[in-house]
Image: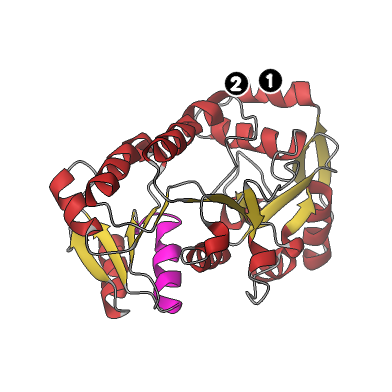
Amino acid sequence: MASKILIIGGTGYIGKFIVGASVKLGHPTFALVRDTSSSDPAKAKLLEGFVSSGVTLLKGNLHDHESLVKAIKEVDVVISAVGAVQLADQIKIVDAIKEVGNIKRFLPSEFGFDHDRVDVIGPAESTFAPKVQIRRAIEAEGTPYTIVSSNYFAGCSLPTLAQADSTGPPKDKVVIYGDGNTKAIFVNEEDVATYTIRAVDDPRTLNKVMYIRPPGDIYTHNELVSLWEKKTGKILERIYLTEEEVLQKLERAPFPINLLTAINYSVFIKGETTRIKIDPSFGVEASELYPDVKYTTVEEYISNLV
């Protein structure tokens, strides 16, 4: 029988995809929401969609321990998809899970780098440090867990060709960090959600990091730009920045451009999304575990953009 899943942060960026995947894959799905009838039109529409698809909305929040415990008692698995500002507050989820005592698996809000095994700098380091703290708390309590390391969200990188200071595709010029030949991983958000839900009842992912590295999602920046040029028929001028120039850019940039610059530095200069060798003692790879998942390749994603 499919586990009952509670998603905390279900109306957020990756959370809404996880809710959708949970329903699609047949899990009784619950979403913890601050207000079941939001005054925000976009959020209200999203919640209506949840309800119509069979999701049970539970009113509560991380700062209301009683509501958190009550919600967790309803389910077998807890998935947190809270945003960056609430990462440290996940300790309240860990505490509530300990009190309830019946949770088969907790998936904290990771969905990016494996922060135990990569180096990030500047705003990326300070923003994501709580992820490591939550991991240690989970281990200390003996909470069964799965960490999802999904690398670079396609929706945050491919539409701009990973331009930190742009909201749309480059028209004439494209900035490339380093020599542009470092491999990086770009995963469609819906695929992240599908692999995540597939993992919740899988004994192979218990107390492991699950890396999402589908072979069709691994590209260098140069290859990504070349693919874009092929699909659009337009050649872009490539501006290559040295490591020193990227660090200078990072120092000058305002938030959130500095955060994106720091992430790009780790991805394209240091190769942090691909350099980890997955050892069975701590990790598994999602597309190897679930070869039947028809994921969206980078080429398909770019084709849809064009």
Determine whether 95 is above or below 168 in the image.
Answer: above
Question: Answer yes or no: do the residues labelled 2 and 1 have beta carbons within 8 Å?
Answer: yes
Give residue 76's position: percent from left, percent from top.
33, 63
Q: Quadrant of the C terminus?
A: bottom right
15 within the magenta span: yes
Give residue 149's position: percent from left, percent from top.
58, 49
Q: Is residue 93 visible?
A: yes
Determine whether 75 is above or below 69 in the image.
Answer: below
Tell me: 251 left or right of 183. left
For the point 38% across and 59% down, which residue is it? 104
In this view, the residue farthest toward the left is 66
> Which of 80 and 38 lies nearest the eye of the viewer?
80
Write down the residue under mark 2.
252
Judging from the image, what secondary structure is the residue with disc 1 in?
helix
Amino acid on which disc 2 is placed: Arg
Task: Write down the region rendered in magenta.
Answer: 10-25
